[in-house]
Amino acid sequence: MSTLKGIIRNGQVIVIGPTDLPDGTEVEILPVGPSAVDDQAQMTPDEIARTLAAMEKIEPFEMTDAERAAIKADRQARKEWEKAHFDEHADRLRRTWE
């Protein structure tokens, strides 16, 4: 099978030139060269240095005991609310499917 070439226009692949593939043929499309969606692209040494420098500037996230207690209390309150309203929510879902 030969390689097809194309370009993207308005989110659609436009094949450059004619093809003898029948309609409905499944194809796999891979970008040529680095692109915004290509997570396998190699970073340049300069990009690596800038990324590491930016990471060094980030301070560690630390919570106080009061903040941990507030988060734990909030989670517990949400859990209790969800348990108290579960039947109501289930009934609404049931009615949707009837």
Image (spheres, helix red, strand yellow):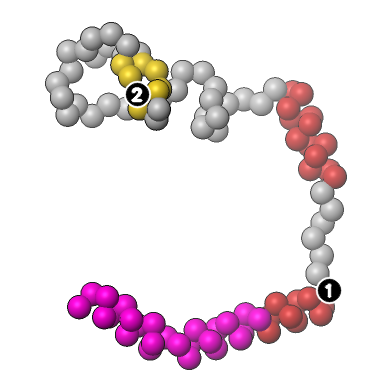
Q: How many marks?
A: 2
Crowding near pointer 1: few (<14 within 10 Å), some, many (20+)?
few
Q: Position of residue 97 (x, y in %)?
A: 23, 75
- Helix, strand or loop under label 1: loop
What residue sits 78% from the left and 76% below the top?
Answer: 67
Please state which amino acid type lies under the numbered disc 2. Answer: Val
Which residue bears the numbered disc 1? Answer: 64
Q: Is residue 2 left or right of residue 20?
A: right
Residue 45 quadrant: top right
- Residue 75 in the image: above or below residue 10: below
Q: Residue furthest left?
A: 22
- Residue 79 in the image: above or below residue 40: below
Observer-nearest of 68 and 77: 77
Q: Residue furthest front?
A: 10
Q: Is residue 40 at least partly visible in the picture? A: no
Q: Is residue 28 at least partly visible in the picture? A: yes
What residue sits 48% from the left and 91% below the top?
Answer: 84
Q: Quadrant of the N terminus?
A: top left
- Residue 17 in the image: above or below residue 72: above
- Helix, strand or loop under label 2: strand
Q: Position of residue 81 (x, y in %)?
A: 53, 87
Q: Quadrant of the C terminus?
A: bottom left
Q: Which residues are magenta?
A: 74-98
Which residue bears the numbered disc 2? Answer: 13
